[in-house]
Image (tube, rainbow, N blue to C red):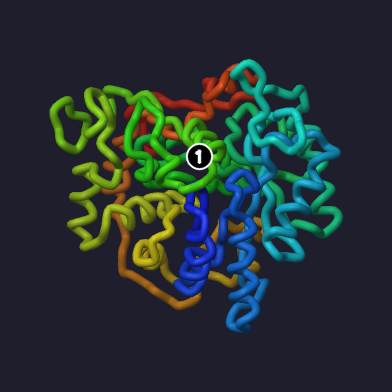
Amino acid sequence: MTLSYRYLMSPPGAVQEAVEVALDAGYRHVDCAYFYQNETEIGAAFQKKLGEGRLKRDELYVVSKLWNSFHAPQDVKPAFLKSLTMLNLDYLDLYLMHSPMGFPNISGELMPQKDGLLLQSDVDYVDTWRAMEKLVDEGLVKSVGVSNFNISQLERLLSVCRIKPAANQVELHPYLTQPELVEYCKSKGIVLIAYSPFGCPALPCSRRLCCLPAVLGRRLSTSLLFAKYCLFAESSSRCSGLSKSSSLSPSGENSPVPLLENPTVNEIAQKHGKTSAQVLIRFHIQRGIATIPKSITPARIVENAEVTGMASEPGALFAPGQWLRCYCHQGRVYDFHLTHKEIQTLEGLNCNTRFIKWNLLGMETHKHFPFSDKKWEVSPGRSASQ
C-alpha cells in the first residue's frame, strides 16, 4: 500500500522544505491540489530534487486535483495545465476531481459567493469527467480519478465512463470507517485513498471554527476560506472514548477524543512500541487503503515513513489488476503488523464522525452534495468485518 504526503493548510515557506524532507525520507507519492494554493512551492521542491540527479521523474507518483470552480468542460484542461506548470512537471500520474460539486468559474475564484452563499453551477460531473478523460488521451496524465464521491455517484459514473476512475480519495479513519464504500470500491477495482487518517489533529476544536489565520500565516481571505472549509463535525455520543469529564475531550461534552490520544489507539501503540500515528497508518494499510497523512515537521514525516516496508517499483502504482503499493526506497522497514483482533477493535471505534464536512456557505444544498446519500454512511459501531 502507498504512503503519501499531503500539503493542505501548510504555512507558506514551509511546504518546499517539507516536500524535500519527505522525498529524502523515501516518500514518492505526493498529493497536491490547486485548492491548497501551494503547488508552486511543491514544484520548486521537485525541481531541486530532480536537479540533484538522485531522483528520477518516473520514481515519483504525483497527484493533483481539479477544483470545483473548473468543472465546465472547457475549463478542465486550462486548470490542469496551470497545476502542471506550477508543479514544474511534464505530466501527472493521477488527476482527481476534487468533489462532484461544481461552482461557476468567476475569474478563477475558489469560492464564488453572493449574499453569503456559495454560487453553484449546473455542470454535471459526468461532463467534467469526459473532459478529464481527454487529458489521458492526450498523454498529459496517466490516470484520472475522483474524490469525495459516494457509492451512487460512483455507480452513475461507472455506467457511462470510457475510462474507469482509478481512485476515490475520501476521509477515512477509525471514527469514520465507511465499510460499505470500502467494499464497493474494492469490488470495482477502484483504489481508495484515505485523507485525514489521524482525524484532523491540526484542528484544535470541534463544533466551531478554528483560528487558522494565525496558524497559517496566510492572507486573511485564504485563511478564513480554509477555516470554514475545515469545519469539525458534530460528534456522535456513540463514539468510543467519549467522556463528558475526560481531559482527553478538551472541546467539551460529547466531543470525540482526538484519535491520536484515544486510549484504545494508545494501548495498541504501546503494545507494539509504536506511536499512535504509526498505528493509524498501519490500520489503513492492512485494510488495503492508501494513506496520505499531512505534516510539515521533519521528524514526523520520517516517523510516518517508517511504518511500511519495501514493495514494488513505481510502475506498479495503479497497474491493471493490482492494488496501490508503497515503495519507500530507503528501505525503512519495521516488523510491525496489527492482529486481526486489533483491526476489529479499531474498526469498532467507528461512530460516523466526519471532520471535513463540506457544509459551509450553503454547499450542503448542492444537487451533487455527496454526504447526504444513504449509501455513503453506515451504522455507528459497524465494522467492515460485520
Q: Nearer the viewer, residue 26 or 253?
A: 253
The residue under the point 52% across, 24% down is 359
The residue under the point 46% across, 48% down is 217
Q: Nearer the viewer, residue 336 or 251?
A: 251
The image position of residue 165, as x and y in percent, is: 69, 44
Residue 105 picture quarter: top right
Q: Nearer the viewer, residue 147 or 157?
A: 147
Q: Is residue 369 above or below residue 87?
A: above
**Label 1 packing within 10 angstroms: few (<14), some (14-19), many (20+):** many
SS under mark 1? helix
Residue 177 visible to the viewer: yes
**Residue kind at label 1, given as amino acid type:** Ser
Q: Nearer the viewer, residue 313 or 254?
A: 254
Judged left or right of residue 309, residue 218 is right
The image position of residue 93, as x and y in percent, is: 68, 59
Judged left or right of residue 383, residue 118 is right
Residue 341 visible to the viewer: no
The image position of residue 251, as x and y in percent, is: 26, 30
The residue under the point 69% across, 50% down is 95
Q: Is residue 112 above or below residue 163?
A: above
The image position of residue 98, as x and y in percent, is: 63, 40
Judged left or right of residue 278, residue 88 is right
Q: Which residue is mark 1?
A: 223
Q: Residue furthest front?
A: 219
Q: Quadrant of the C terminus?
A: top left
The residue under the point 27% across, 42% down is 345
